[in-house]
Amino acid sequence: MRALQFILVLDLIFEIFTWVLVARFLLSWIPNVNYYHPVVRYIYKVTDFVVRPFRGILPPVGNIDFSPLIMFLVLRLGYSLVRRILAIVVLGFAWGG
């Protein structure tokens, strides 16, 4: 059942990435963050390709950008769809169909 292990690893990677995104948005709410710190730069570098397309969809309220809410919703729904498709394919092979 290597395919099931693949799905579990994919779940783990997605959850880690989700928490890195949460860290990025929490950092954006903290004043005086050192954006040149290596950890902060890494977080922004890893997540920028996902954040960039959603930036500015909703107008910011004060200093808070709510477009990440749309991004999280799209990511969760998209990953849920991909995971279900993978599960159907894996179960289809397991049952000989």
Image (tube, grey):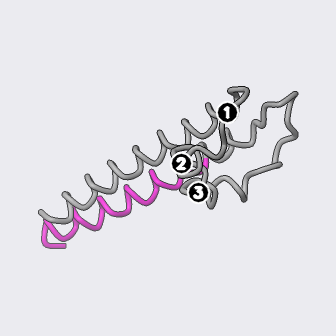
- Please, what is the three-letter code of the amino acid marked with disc 3? Lys
Residue 31 falls in image quadrant: top right
Tell which of 3 and 19 is nearer to you: 19
Magenta run includes residue 47: no
Element type at mark 2:
helix
Side (left or right) of 59 relative to 83? right
> Disc 2 versus disc 1: distance between alpha carbons?
12 Å
Tell me residue 97's x, y (percent): 19, 73
Numbered badge on residue 38: 2
Q: Dot 1 corresponds to which residue?
A: 33
Question: Where does the N terminus fall, quadrant-wise?
Answer: bottom left
Element type at mark 3:
helix
Q: Are marks 2 and 1 in contact (CB under 8 Å)?
A: no
Who's the residue at 83% across and 42% down the image?
58
Who's the residue at 73% across and 53% down the image?
54
Side (left or right) of 93 relative to 80? left
Count of numbered badges drawn on the protein: 3
> In the image, which is nearer the foreground, mark 2 or mark 3?
2
Q: Which region of the structure is painted magenta? A: 74-97
Who's the residue at 33% across and 56% down the image?
10
Question: Mark 2 Cα within 10 Å, few/some/many (few <14, many 20+)?
Answer: few
Question: Mark 1 Cα within 10 Å, few/some/many (few <14, many 20+)?
Answer: few
Side (left or right) of 35 relative to 39? right
Tell me which label, 2 or 3, sits earlier in the chain.
Answer: 2
Numbered badge on residue 58: none
Who's the residue at 38% across and 56% down the image?
83
Tell me residue 28's x, y (percent): 69, 35
Tell which of 52 and 42 is nearer to you: 42
Element type at mark 1:
loop
Tell which of 84 and 61 is nearer to you: 61
Numbered badge on residue 45: 3
